[in-house]
Image (cartoon, rainbow, N blue to C red):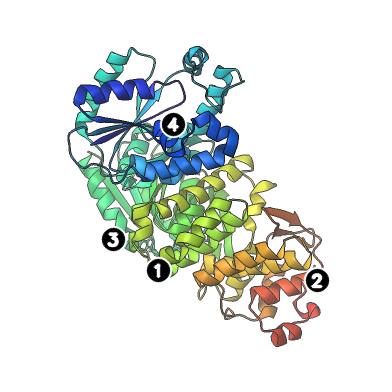
C-alpha cells in the first residue's frame, strides 16, 4: 500500500512521512526532493527562473513517475506531496485512487508559526506574513485536501504516527473522492464509485430516517438499484418513486403524481429526497422538492454527463408546458450534489458526445486547460471509450466544468449578471431545439450549433480573433458536433429566438466569445445575427445568401 500525505506548508508532511516509513521499513518519497533532483535546482529557484506553471508541470511528471498504486496490503511507500500538488485534478486522481490519502491539518496560526521559524524558503509564502498566506491557501485548497483522512498536524509526531498506524489498517477504499466542498449552493462531491457513500453521508447530516430515491426506470436499472442495495446494507430503509424517462418527466401531471406518492408515503417537511438520473429527472425531481410541502431538501445525483457538468448544479428546476420548455419552475438548491463519474459508463455515446458541446462552451468561457483536455480526450469520451475513465480525463472534465459552474452560480444565483455568461451558444441553440420540437436534437448538440453561431457573430464584429474562432470550430469538427445542417428552417429558428425568454426590452442579449473569455452585447446588428444564424445552421453560402437579414432578423 502507498500512503500519501497532503496538507499545507508547515503541516509536517516530510517529518511525519519519514518517521512512518522508517517504522515500517517502507520507502519514503518526497515529491519536492524528487523534482529538485530531476531538474537539478531547488524548488525556489525553479519558481524564480521558470514560474509556478513550469514547476506544476514538473510536479505532474513526478506524480506520473510514481507509477501504479501498490496493491499490497503492507505499507510499501509513504509519499509526501508539495502543498499545491493536489490542485491539479489529474494529480489527485493519481495520488488518491488506490492509495491511502491523509490530510495533515492544523490552524493557520500554528502552521504559520512553524513556517516563520523554518529556514526553508516557500515560494508562495516568502516575503509575506506566513499566517495570512496560510489562511488564504487553506481557503483555496480545502476542497482538494478534504477527501483525504483528516488528522491534526499539531500533535507530537509520535502521536500522529500512532493515529495513522491505527487508521491505515483499513487500507485504501475501492472508490475515490476527488473533491469535496461546502458551498453556498450545497455540498459538492466529485469522485468515482462514491454515489452510495456520499448519499449515505448526506442523509446522515440531514438526520434522515429513510432514503427516498427518485429515479426513472432506466436510471433505476443502471444506477438506482445498486445504490439502493448499498444504502439498505448500510441500514437505510428505502422508498422508491419512479418518474417517466427523459423529457417525459418534465410534466406538471408527473409532478402531481410524484407529490401524491410522497403524500402517501407520509413524507414530512424534514425529509430529504435523492434524485438519481439525467438532467430531465433532476429538473423534475428538483421541482417536486421545491414544491412539495413548500419545499423539502434534495440530494442531486446526476447520472448523465450533462447532469454532472451542468443541469443538476445551480438550483434551477423546471418542467415544460405545451407552450414551451422550462416554463414552470423554481430556484431550489440541493443540500448536496454528488457527481460519481463511474455512473457515466452506461451512457450511450450520443449522450456523451452531445454533453461535450456544453463542455466546450465552459472551456470557451475561460478555461484553457479544459479546452486542451477536450482536444486530447474529447474524441475518446465521445466514443464511450474506457480510457478517459481510467486516466482520470473524464473526472477532470467533470470537475472543471462543475466547479466553474459553482463559481459562477455562487456569484450570481438569480442570473442578474455573471450567470448569464453560461448562456453562451444558447440563444441560437434554444432556437434550434425549439424549432426541432425538442425531440430530434439533444441540448448539447444544439449548444454546439449555437456556439458556432456565436463565434461567427463575434468574428463579424471583430470581437474574437480568427485563430480562437478557428480553434473552437476545429474542436467541434473533431467531436462531430454541428457538422451538418440541423433539420430545422432558419425562419423557424429566428421565430423561436424572438420569443426567447432572454429577449429583454425588445433586444436579444448575446454572449459572445473573445480571445480569452466572453462578453455580453445587446447591440448586435441584424447583419451579424444573420451571419451567426447562417454559420450556426451550417447553411451553404448559397442558402445563407437566401436567408437575408430581413428574413432571419429577430423581431423586436
Ligand atoms: N437545470 C439546469 O440548469 C439545466 C441545464 C442544462 C440542461 N437541463 C435539462 O436537462 C435535460 C437534459 O438532460 P440529459 O442530457 O441529462 O438527458 P435526460 O435527462 O433526458 O436523459 C436522457 C436519457 O438517458 C437515460 N440515462 C440517464 N442516465 C443514464 C445512464 N447513466 N446510463 C444510461 N442511460 C441513462 C435517461 O433514462 C434518459 O432516458 C433537459 O430537460 C434540459 O432542459 C437543465
Q: Nearer the viewer, mark 4 or mark 2?
A: 4
Helix, strand or loop at mark 2: helix
For the residue carrying disc 2, how many other residues have a C-alpha within 10 Å: few (<14), some (14-19), or many (20+)?
some
Q: Quadrant of the C terminus?
A: bottom right
Q: Which residue is mark 3?
A: 221
Q: Position of residue 191 (x, y in %)?
A: 37, 45
Q: CA distance from mark 2 to mark 3?
A: 49 Å
Asked if residue 233 is positioned above or below residue 373 in the image, the reply reads above
Image quarter for residue 2?
top left
Q: Is residue 373 visible?
A: yes
Check contact, mark 3 vs mark 1: CB within 8 A.
Answer: no
Q: Of circles 2 and 3, which is in front? A: 2
Q: Where's ligand 1: which quadrant?
A: bottom left
Query: Label 2 belongs to which residue?
Result: 526
The reply to whether the C-beta atoms of the residues labelled 4 and 2 are less than 8 Å apart is: no
The furthest residue to the front = 40
**Front one among 266 and 156:** 156
Asked if 27 appears above or below 440 in the picture, the reply is: above
The residue identified by callout 4 is: 82
Residue 298 visible somewhere in the drawing? no
Expressed as whole percent of the image width and height from the top left, the position of residue 49 reads 59, 36
SS state under label 3: helix
Q: Nearer the viewer, mark 1 or mark 2?
A: 1
Q: CB of mark 2 within 8 Å of CB of mark 3?
A: no
Inter-mark Cα distance, 4 to 3: 43 Å
Q: Nearer the viewer, mark 3 or mark 1?
A: 1
Which label's residue is closer to the chain start, 4 or 3? Answer: 4
Q: Which residue is mark 1?
A: 383
Report the Cα–Cα distance between label 4 and label 1: 36 Å
- Specify whether 62 is left or right of 17: right
Amino acid at each position: 500500500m502507498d500512503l500519501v500525505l497532503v496538507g499545507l506548508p508547515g503541516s509536517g508532511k516530510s517529518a511525519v512521512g519519514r518517521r512512518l516509513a522508517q517504522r515500517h521499513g517502507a520507502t519514503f518519497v518526497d515529491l519536492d526532493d524528487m523534482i529538485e533532483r530531476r531538474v537539478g535546482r531547488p524548488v525556489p529557484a525553479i519558481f524564480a527562473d521558470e514560474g509556478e506553471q513550469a514547476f506544476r508541470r514538473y510536479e505532474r511528471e513526478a506524480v506520473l513517475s510514481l507509477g501504479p498504486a501498490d496493491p499490497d496490503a503492507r505499507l510499501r511507500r509513504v509519499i509526501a506531496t508539495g502543498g499545491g500538488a493536489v490542485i491539479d485534478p489529474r494529480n489527485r486522481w493519481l495520488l488518491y485512487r488506490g492509495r491511502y490519502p491523509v490530510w495533515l491539518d492544523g490552524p493557520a496560526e500554528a502552521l504559520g508559526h512553524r513556517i516563520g521559524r523554518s529556514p526553508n524558503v516557500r515560494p508562495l509564502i516568502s516575503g509575506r506574513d506566513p499566517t495570512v498566506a496560510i489562511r488564504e491557501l487553506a481557503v483555496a485548497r480545502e476542497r482538494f485536501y478534504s477527501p483525504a483522512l483528516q488528522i491534526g498536524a499539531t500533535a507530537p509526531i509520535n502521536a500522529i504516527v500512532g493515529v495513522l498506524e491505527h487508521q491505515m489498517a483499513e487500507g485504501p477504499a475501492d472508490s475515490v473522492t476527488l473533491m469535496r466542498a461546502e458551498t453556498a449552493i450545497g455540498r459538492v462531491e466529485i469522485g468515482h464509485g462514491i454515489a452510495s457513500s456520499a448519499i449515505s453521508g448526506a442523509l446522515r447530516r440531514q438526520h434522515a430516517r429513510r432514503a427516498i430515491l427518485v429515479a426513472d426506470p432506466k436510471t433505476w436499472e443502471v444506477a438506482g438499484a445498486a445504490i439502493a442495495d448499498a444504502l439498505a446494507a448500510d441500514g437505510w430503509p428505502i422508498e422508491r418513486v419512479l418518474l417517466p424517462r427523459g423529457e417525459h418527466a418534465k410534466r406538471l401531471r408527473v409532478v402531481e403524481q410524484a407529490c401524491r406518492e410522497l403524500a402517501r408515503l407520509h413524507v414530512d417537511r424534514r425529509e430529504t429526497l435523492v434524485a438519481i438520473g439525467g438532467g430531465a429527472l433532476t429538473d423534475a425531481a428538483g421541482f417536486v422538492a421545491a414544491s412539495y410541502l413548500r419545499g423539502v431538501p434534495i440530494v442531486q445525483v446526476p447520472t448523465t454527463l450533462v447532469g454532472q457538468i451542468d443541469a443538476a448544479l445551480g438550483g434551477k428546476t423546471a418542467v415544460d408546458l405545451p407552450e414551451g420548455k422550462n416554463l414552470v419552475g423554481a430556484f431550489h438548491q440541493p443540500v448536496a450534489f454528488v457527481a460519481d463519474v463511474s455512473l457515466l459508463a452506461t451512457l450511450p455515446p450520443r449522450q456523451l458526445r452531445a454533453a461535450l458541446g456544453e463542455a466546450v462552451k465552459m472551456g470557451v468561457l475561460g478555461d484553457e486547460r479544459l479546452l486542451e483536455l477536450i482536444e486530447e480526450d474529447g474524441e475518446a469520451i465521445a466514443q464511450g471509450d474506457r480510457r478517459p475513465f481510467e486516466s482520470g480525463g473524464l473526472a477532470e472534465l467533470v470537475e472543471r466544468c462543475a466547479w466553474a459552474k459553482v463559481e459562477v452560480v455562487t456569484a450570481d444565483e438569480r442570473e442578474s449578471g455573471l450567470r448569464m455568461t453560461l448562456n453562451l451558444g444558447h440563444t441560437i441553440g434554444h432556437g434550434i431545439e425549439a424549432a426541432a420540437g425538442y425531440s430530434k436534437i439533444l441540448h448539447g448538440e444544439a449548444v454546439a450549433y449555437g456556439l458556432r453561431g456565436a463565434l461567427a457573430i463575434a468574428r463579424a464584429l471583430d470581437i474574437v480573433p480568427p485563430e480562437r474562432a478557428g480553434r473552437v470550430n476545429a474542436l467541434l469538427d473533431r467531436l462531430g458536433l454541428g457538422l451538418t445542417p440541423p433539420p430545422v428552417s432558419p425562419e423557424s429558428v429566428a421565430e423561436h429566438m424572438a420569443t426567447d425568454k432572454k429577449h429583454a426590452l425588445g433586444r436579444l442579449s448575446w454572449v459572445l466569445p473573445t480571445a480569452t473569455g466572453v462578453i455580453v452585447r445587446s447591440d448586435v446588428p441584424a447583419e451579424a445575427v444573420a451571419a451567426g444564424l447562417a454559420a450556426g445552421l451550417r447553411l451553404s453560402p448559397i442558402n445563407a445568401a437566401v436567408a437575408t437579414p430581413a428574413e432571419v432578423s429577430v423581431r423586436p
